[in-house]
Amino acid sequence: MSRLRNRRPPAGSAAASAEQPPVQASYNIVPIQDVVMHGQHPSLRFPEVRAAVAALVHVADLPPPPLARAWDPHRADLFDWLGLTFGFQRHNVTNQREHLVLLLANAQLRAAGTLALPRDHPPDVLHFSIAQDIRKKLLKNYDAWCAYLGQRPHVHVPRRNAGVDTRRELLYTALYLLIWGEAANLRFMPECLCYIFHYMALDLNHVIDRSVDIETGRPAIPAVCGEDAFLNRVVTPIYTVLAAEVKASQNGTKPHSAWRNYDDVNEYFWSRRVFKRLQWPLDTSRGFFVPPGKLGRIGKTGFVEQRSFWNLYRSFDRLWVMLILFFQAAMIIAWDGRAYPWQSLRFRDIQVRVLSVFITWAGLRFMQALLDAGTQYSLVSRETKRIAVRMVLKAFVAAGWTITFSVLYVRMWDQRWRDRRWSFAANTRVLNFLEAAAVFIIPQVLALALFILPWIRNFTEKTNWRILYVLTWWFQTRTFVGRGLREGLIDNIKYSTFWIFLLAAKFSFSYFLQIKPMVAPTKTIFTLHDIRRNWFEFMPHTERLAVIILWVPVVLIYLMDIQIWYAVFSSLTGALIGLFSHLGEIRSVGQLQLRFQFFASAMQFNLMPEERLDRVHGDIRSKLYDAIHRLKLRYGFGRPYRKIEANQVEAKRFALIWNEIIQTFREEDIVSDKEVELLELPPVVWKIRVVRWPCLLLNNELLLALSQAKELVADDKTHWSRISSIEYRRCAVIEAYDSIRQLLLEIIEERSVEHIIVNQLFLAFDNAMVDGKFSEEYRLNLLPQIHSSVITLVELLLKANKDQTKIVNTLQTLYVLAVHDFPKNRKDIEQLRREGLAPSRPTESGLLFEDAITCPGENDLSFYKQVRRLHTILTSRDSMNDIPKNPEARRRISFFSNSLFMNMPRAPTVEKMVAFSVLTPYYNEDVLYNKDQLRRENEDGISILFYLQKIYEDDWGNFLERMKREGMVKDDEIWAGKFQELRLWASYRGQTLARTVRGMMYYYRALKMLAFLDTASEIDITEGTKRLATFGSVRHENDVYPMNNGLQQRPQRRLSRGASTVSQLFKGMEDGAALMKYTYVVACQIYGNQKKGKDQRAEDILALMKKNEALRVAYVDEVRPEMGDMQYYSVLVKFDQALQKEVEIYRIRLPGPLKLGEGKPENQNHAIIFTRGDAVQTIDMNQDNYFEEALKMRNLLEQYSYNHGSQKPTLLGVREHVFTGSVSSLAWFMSAQETSFVTLGQRVLANPLKVRMHYGHPDVFDRLWFLTRGGLSKASRVINISEDIFAGFNCTLRGGNVSHHEYIQVGKGRDVGLNQISMFEAKVSSGNGEQTLSRDIYRLGHRVDFFRMLSVFYTTVGFYFNTMLVVLTVYTFTWGRLYLALSGLEAGIQGSANATNNKALGAVLNQQFVIQLGLFTALPMILENSLELGFLPAVWDFFTMQMNFSSVFYTFSMGTKSHYYGRTILHGGAKYRATGRGFVVQHKSFAENYRLYARSHFIKAIELGIILTVYAVHSVIARNTLVYIVMMISSWFLVVSWIMAPFAFNPSGFDWLKTVYDFEDFMTWIWFPGGIFSKAEHSWEVWWYEEQDHLRTTGLWGKILEIVLDLRYFFFQYGVVYQLKIADGSRSIAVYLLSWICVAVIFGVFVLMSYTRDQYAAKQHLYYRVVQCAIIILGVLVLILFLEFTEFQIIDIFTGLLAFIPTGWGLISIAQVIRPFIESTVVWGSVISVARLYEILLGVIVMAPVALLSWLPGFQEMQTRVLFNEGFSRGLQISRILAGKKTNVV
């Protein structure tokens, strides 16, 4: 170890940064650089750390690094040598050195004492197996890549019998880490890193083997070496390729097929040709490096993303084949007309007709082949001819099968009709058909066989044998990922059973209630002829079109209703799994009281390390041992549930942990000082013989015991058995007895007569109880009197001004009662003197206690704390089930206590736990609320602080109580002396970085406490608890106590705020253990710019670092040198407590700007190199954590040692609690929906479905596994807009395993306002649209088995697609009914085929309505709440939500999802939408709501409303009101929800004055002129252009489809004009053509008016008025002529407007699509003018119902109650808030 002393980096270290930071920290976590200076550092006490450092120093016999200016092998290590040899940056070398040291040290710590290491292995020597295991894990992906490409790995390690070479193992590991640490954006491309490592490892082998260069004859040197060589010659060229592609994408607006993203570049390295193409060192003249637009550029690789809904069919073709084939077969069977399908299938005709499904199946295969060719043709190049060959062959083969089946099918029927029966010849042809079908389904049979034997499938896919490539070439493209994804047989059975039952229910329902009832009306309609039409018919027999119209909604619901069945089955399955997981067994604090002592044993069992550390995790014996103990713990059997007494160390450990939890509650202000005393477990003082349970558990127990003693006449044994039957009563009695004795002895002077008397008196009591004669010797009915006197004494002692006389009198009364009245046999004075119960001499027989009482001083906190506790035990009469009062504190206690009875791994010691990091990406959100934010008032006079005070009224009161305890006298002082505390209090209740940091630092605090408990001996804990008792309270000192009904402060040494009570007992080594195991990195991307700009956020981040020593901040620093381009650095900083300033730790230069892809994953990626450990938890900026949950983190990390299914997990799913649910009704809806998804939903996805991914939750990643496989997310621009879920996709495709665990939870905030929620859902829906196009979804759809494919579809993109189908069903149904009504078909078929009343349409409408109302979302919520809260509370919550219009919200949300999902797939436009995550206390203007919802909701709702109105007027069915209501209620509900929801959920949405102001603001916005510097918020024209952006970037097919959809408005005109009275029943085409003339005339008049207004309105106003007058006169004349000479009626004016207004909107919509062609013409200006008028009209239509409700009295109050109902339930005075009456508020 001598070489470690005073180590400094060699002078020739690579890549010194251009500008040295002013202050350089010597180390980050472990002071490797200078062991002498930091020799006493806590982390260096671990011999494993020193062993790891020592293992790296053996470099003396290595060749000197080439091109190094200076080299001293005695002051360097392997990292220094590699850095100089290959040209790595110095800070990268330093960073990765610490990284590897911690990996090695932690691995050896975990292995010590187990079977992994020999028992006699010294801890200060690194064992070779540790280095080998880490190397194997880091290079596992590299080995798989080499095997896939048929390359021999360049990792040369000795074989088993060839000796051990630890240094070589470490060199390979260090080389990979250095490559990864400096790769920057290349980290998203793991196989690219494999390629780089492949050649650099080869160079490393040449150097350390001292090979000779054949060309030069000199010792071999690396191809890449020199200062900054790796960055400049390896990273930068590839980065430049990526940057050029991103630039060519025009910020992701170009089609995905036109540019290469991260995945394309990475998959370029999946080909064997890459070695010849790129070579080494990288040849930048090759096509790979050619920028876009230049000749010879390499295009897309592996997959081409195309915008089309056909992607859903391509990716999940097996699902659609199943649905289509069943529908066809069901139609054939149902058409036969028999009651049951098996009755029809007895007949050969039906059997043969069913065989036609094979023709359809082959046709679908042909369509799949065409789609593959049509979307992936750009993959074909000169080097990928095999892809083209396969595409063509698959199309020809599928076409051949289609033709073959068609011919065979025709031949069967031809023979049958010739023979007029199913003769032998006909049956022979049937047999021929079946033989062909058997050949056709051979691949499916083989897939089924491999599904039953999954290990064979996995073996064949993972094995890189060429013969297997040839055999599988036909079925799928060979890819590096997506191989061997089959689960184990048990998992297969579980999720197969789930889907078999689900599909059986779905298909049965579809056949009997959807398909079969439609057959009879269909047959009837086909028989109808000569139905009178109301318009001109372009084709004959259009009654068949009626059949299509009736069937389309049925087919759409048939295609999507598996989503409903999935919701039902997954809810039931999830509830069942949760029940067996013991969720919800403790639902309240009251239930915890009943099991508290069991809870103490459970905490000891789960949170304290197991004794047998050498046991093998996961073996049968271990599982059986744990299962038996958990059974005993859960149900109270056996020794683990024996009564624990105060002298047991387990009780003291439990008390320390429990009190620390309550302490954090107090610091968070969710409990009061009084509640702390009721909840805490006090230290053992006053020689009390039992566990001092919290007062919460002892309430009323002493009084009940006294009542029993008074009323029951029995012996001692009977009395005591009854008391002991209830543990808390036994403890209350004994503690009260011991406390009274100790209290009297404390206040009476020692060695006084009175002291002796009291001692003798209690000794007599003790002897009587020991002899079992207490009830015989004493009058138990006098105990209540004694009890009253003791209470009086205690209350006198608690007063601030103690009345000595009253105390003496009370003691004398007690003496008389106890000595004279209490005994049954009265004793004379002599007898009392002999027994020591009276003064021995008569001279001393004056007033007792008069001169013997000395009350302890007020500084004796411990004494008065015990007195207060005694007073509580003596006087508590009421139930304390409402303690703690705060619902959040109650929820947390309940969940934590319940979780300890769930199954979880046993906790290891902190030293042996898995080390982990937490990574939080941060950009520019709030860190802490500043003074302006807290005090700024909105238009109603409401500030954030006032809002928080009312929402969190309990917390605010507790906060003021704490501040007064800490020195604040008046409330006004909070803005001065306590302002920082106020900022923290408010920020901890928002979604701020401060809240997240506080939560994540609980890990550090918990680990320090657990490290102390792990190493503390019984003596340490016993003495420590005694020492803690001297502090008087677990609260901070300077406590305030009730004295004489007032508050009096007690000055004393104050503990540092935030320091735990246990921290007073720490030995100094706990920090080292915690830092070794935990690192928290916040990726504050623009922190450097914030510092330069003097941003308040930078100061707040610095304050957080100062407050939390384990916090590290990573940011990107931009440095512009005097010459050259801007340079970018990844920088890590911390706050140095010794220097009291921020210091830099690492500064690693980047090849260019950080952000090439999406911002969040890029931010995570640049900071991940600073994380440490074997696991990393991803935490978003809106999350929180809890101390009690942090205690279970080491249990969670042990899950990596257990199999979940067929393998160990690589991603641990963690449950979330949404903490924003109490803010408003909207927040409650969102919280309830989200909670069911992150609990029940994730539970089912993980088990049994095995398709749980990663959804941005606080999941814990296997860090080494993920850093070698692309990182924690994907970052390609636009396609990876939902970056988190792609980590789950990537994990699954690369053979990882995702589990889910619900015994631990992390807090998460959600958006709380409708606009925020809508923007969030727009982002998620757009992200799902992009996922639909992605290669990940395509590969999952094809590489997993059939049932897992169903799970993937219906839990990812399928949910959004089916939501869109629901909206499409409403559209098709309403437009179809309109067609039937206007055409006359409905009247014609009404009498013969009452299709509107049949069961099929009823079933369809019911299913659609169920989804629309969000009921299928509500079912998981109801079941999960039933499980965790109880059935009745769950039903009540659901009922309350319905009363608060939750169905309106869910219907509105459905519109948001469908709009953005569909538009993204068709046109693109997905982007990150910042929601702000703030509090919703401000009224949103009408203009803002219109901008946000006009296109997604308002336009569509108005369209449906017009259709429903026209249908109601012209439909014969509508005359029957009940039938119309039943048919159209769901559609009308959708219309109302889509229009009214933004106002119903808008604060002050129905306030009349605000409505008036909103309309004025809307009109101002409409007419505000657009310009270069105008924004959409100010000008309608700018917004209108922005709304068309997606049409500018969409492809040709997107534009064509948009135009086709817009043609529906012209059909509407076509149908309505024939209803005009002026048409006089004519069915001529001329009617429609004349209507277009009217449209042209109206448009011409508008153009004329616009022209004259522009020309004459300003200067020649008279001309303008003349033109206006002429047009009016002409219009009147035309009207008179029509009235006189035609059948024209006034009603025709309104009918015509109804026909022509949608036509105008359709023309405007088409004009927007063809804008590039007409924008330069005069027409475009008219289009803008007409569009503006339309927007005004739409705004008025939307505003009208809002204005009406605002004008009517009472609606504003009702809306306020609905919106803030949850707040009302917690006592929130919303009326005061909205009125702004802020009295008595700080």
Image: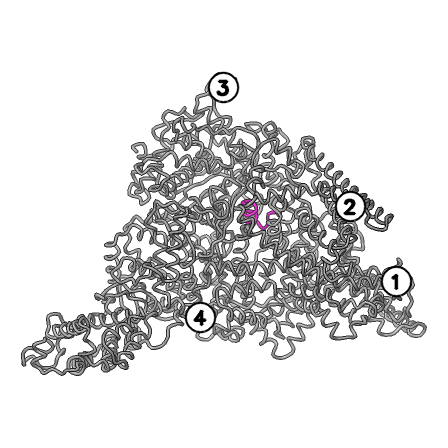
Residue matched to label 2: 430
Labels 4 & 1 near each other (Cβ < 8 A): no
Quarter occupied by residue 192: top right
Q: CA distance from mark 3 to mark 4?
A: 78 Å
Q: CA distance from mark 1 to mark 2?
A: 53 Å
Residue matched to label 1: 1632
Relative to 962, 1727 lies left or right? right
Labels 3 & 2 near each other (Cβ < 8 A): no
Give the answer, above or below, for where 4 lies relative to 997: above
Q: In terms of sequence position, does the residue under pointer 1 or pointer 2 come before the other?
A: 2
Q: Which is closer to the viewer, label 2 or label 4? A: 2
Label 2: which secondary element: helix
Relative to 1116, 1466 lies left or right? right
Q: CA distance from mark 3 to mark 1?
A: 87 Å
Q: CA distance from mark 2 to mark 4?
A: 79 Å
Along the viewing direction, whichever of 507 and 1532 lies nearer the viewer: 507
* Residue range highlighted in magenta: 1277-1291
Q: In terms of sequence position, does the residue under pointer 4 or pointer 1 come before the other?
A: 4
Along the viewing direction, whichever of 246 and 298 lies nearer the viewer: 298
Residue 1328 percent across, percent down from the top left: 62, 52
Q: CA distance from mark 3 to mark 2?
A: 73 Å
| Amino acid on which disc 2 is placed | Val
Q: In terms of sequence position, does the residue under pointer 3 or pointer 4 come before the other?
A: 3
Residue matched to label 4: 953
Residue matched to label 3: 213
